[in-house]
Image (tube, coloured by chain):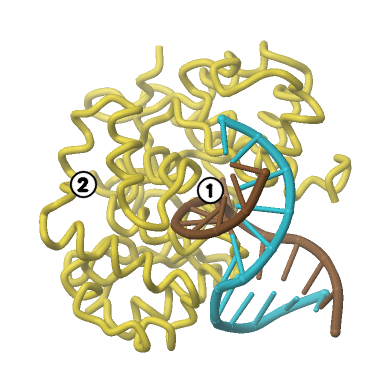
Chain colours: A yellow, B brown, C cyan
DNA sequence: GACCAGGTATTGC
DNA sequence: GCAATACATGGT
């Protein structure tokens, strides 16, 4: 039902392509190192020299389909058509958001890069987040996003030069805890949501929202429902009195559709 | 120049 | 527990 990719290829290639819009997926605020150049999307993902770079355009996705790494990154095994069918039953607004954001998929991103990206995201805008992540990567990333070891060795004034501002002490604390092994990100996979969230929130500068974003976009915990300013407005307006459990096991996917809808749809009442 | 941006820590009740 | 406030920086 949910599995779309089957042994030896895809059973429903056309439906899969309907459920992957590069521009929606790569520019909806879940990843920060992708850029559009003409009709291409170009990005580098992962840490240091282990990072990978891809150039791809919407009308030729073969590089993604034929690569195990990129198939996994773009989450091709999940049937988003089926998820949208289920979410659309929840309410007319949810159905509208599913249609409007129909090409968004939740990426499988590196834990550390995702954690840092969303620490940086607090009280910040997406354009500036991208700039900071890019500067950190270009200057200290050895190809990809800088490792925890690397960032833990940088002085506060060096981080501030990258534009981090008051978040520099948060990145420093995260780096120290991860580099020292005090927090083992890989081990969080084994924990339930509450335990994993509490563990992440031991980092100075990581609260409920950043923890949820890290779990959703880095650990692929699709039931996580990050409450940011946009989603608060959506909830107050369209789902008063409800919480994330209202959206079921794919609440995180619903959240991302609603986020994109609220933020960019000119018809809706938020902009 | 005030206000905002995918929040969080701190402070004061 | 909950409301108010500071926090760096750059864009509008």
Parent chain of label 2: A
Q: Element under label 2?
A: helix
Q: CA distance from mark 1 to mark 2?
A: 24 Å
Q: Nearer the viewer, mark 1 or mark 2?
A: 2
Write the residue at 35% across / 20% down.
A3
Write the residue at 37% across / 31% down.
A221
Where residue A251 appears, as percent x and y from the top left, is 53, 25
Q: Which residue is mark 1?
A: A25
Q: Where A150 falls versus A94 (above or below)?
A: below
Residue A154, can we see it? yes
Image quarter of the N terminus of chain A: top left
Q: Element under label 1?
A: helix
Residue closer to the observer: A229 or A251: A229
- Using a 10 Å C-alpha cutoff, classify the residue at mark 1 as few (fewer than 14 neighbours), some (14 to 19) or many (20 or more): many
Write the residue at 59% across / 33% down.
A255
Q: Which residue is mark 2?
A: A185
Mark toward the start of the polypeptide (1 vs 2): 1
Where residue A8 appears, as percent x and y from the top left, is 23, 28
Task: State the mark number for residue A111.
Answer: none
Number of marks = 2
Q: Where A271 falls versus B4 (above or below)?
A: above
Compared across the picture, whether A170 is left or right of A24 comes to left
Image quadrant of residue A74?
A: top left
């Amino acid at each position: 039902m949910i599995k779309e990719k089957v042994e030896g290829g895809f059973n429903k290639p056309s439906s899969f392509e309907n459920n992957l819009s590069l521009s929606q997926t790569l520019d909806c605020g879940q990843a920060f190192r992708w850029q559009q150049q003409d009709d291409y999307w170009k990005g580098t993902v992962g840490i240091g020299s282990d990072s990978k770079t891809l150039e791809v355009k919407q009308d030729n996705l073969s590089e993604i389909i034929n690569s195990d790494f990129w198939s996994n990154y773009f989450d091709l095994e999940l049937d988003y058509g089926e998820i949208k069918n289920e979410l659309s039953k929840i309410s007319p607004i949810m159905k509208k958001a599913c249609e409007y954001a129909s090409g968004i998929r939740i990426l499988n991103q590196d834990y550390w890069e995702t954690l840092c990206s969303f620490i940086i995201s607090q009280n910040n805008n997406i354009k500036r987040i991208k700039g900071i992540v890019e500067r950190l990567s270009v200057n200290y990333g050895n190809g990809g996003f800088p490792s925890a070891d690397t960032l833990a060795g940088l002085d506060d004034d060096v981080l501030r030069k990258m534009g981090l501002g008051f978040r520099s002490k948060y990145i420093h604390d995260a780096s120290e805890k991860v580099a020292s092994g005090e927090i083992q990100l890989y081990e969080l996979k084994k924990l339930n949501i509450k335990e994993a969230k509490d563990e992440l929130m031991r980092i100075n500068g990581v609260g409920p929202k950043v923890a949820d974003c890290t779990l959703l976009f880095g650990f692929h915990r699709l039931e996580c429902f990050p409450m940011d300013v946009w989603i608060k407005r959506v909830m107050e307006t369209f789902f008063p009195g409800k919480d994330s459990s209202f959206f079921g096991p794919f609440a995180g996917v619903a959240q991302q559709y609603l986020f994109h809808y609220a933020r960019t749809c000119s018809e809706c009442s938020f902009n």
